[in-house]
Amino acid sequence: MKTRGFEVVFSFLEKDIVLPKRNTSGSAGYDLEAAETVTISPGEIIPCPTGLKAYMQDSEVLQVYPRSSLAVKKHLILINSVGIIDKDYYNNESNEGHIQVLLYNYGKETVTIQKHERVAQGIFMTFLKADNEPNQHAKRLGGFGSTGN
């Protein structure tokens, strides 16, 4: 039985996608690479595809953080600060759970992210539920931002 991890989304199966790994035994984050080369103009927001989806257990979430070198060296930040990948994002009907990193170029020059360049790190975390939480039976139907109006 699978517990938690990463898989390549169907549309990227033949595109040389590297499954994330922790680079040291003390690392919390799994390095996420760009699945293709993307160019980001100043003031632009671009979804950088990873070609990956993540599976996990109930009461777990994958949090996606930017690599610190993105801001310092390339003037790029994650537009939403931290990406939240919920358990039910995996294999959703809209985009199969494809993880994309929303990058914003706050610099004055166009920046290119090369395929296989590490752009973010994902950390699997457990979360707690509040007392008296209503029983949730809704099914996720979409991809990005699909849980709210």
Image (cartoon, grey):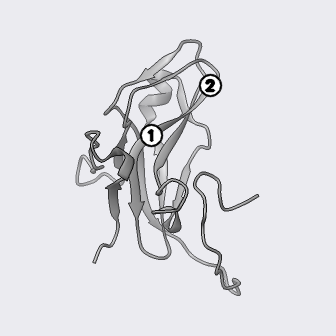
Front-most of residues 141 and 106 = 141
User: Is 105 rendered above or below residue 140?
Assistant: above
Cα–Cα gap, marks 1 and 2: 16 Å
Residue 68's quadrant in the figure? top left
Residue tagged 1: 49
User: Is 60 rendered above or below residue 148?
Assistant: below
Residue tagged 2: 44
Q: Earlier in the sequence, mark 1 or mark 2?
A: 2
- Residue 67 x/y as whole percent: 43, 37
Front-most of residues 18 and 10 = 10
* Label 1–label 2 contact, CB within 8 A: no
Residue type, label 1:
Pro
Q: Is residue 29 visible?
A: no
Q: Secondary structure at mark 1?
A: strand
Image quadrant for the C terminus? bottom right
Residue type, label 2:
Glu
- Residue 30 x/y as whole percent: 34, 50
Residue 60 is left or right of residue 106, and the answer is left
Front-most of residues 135 and 129 = 135
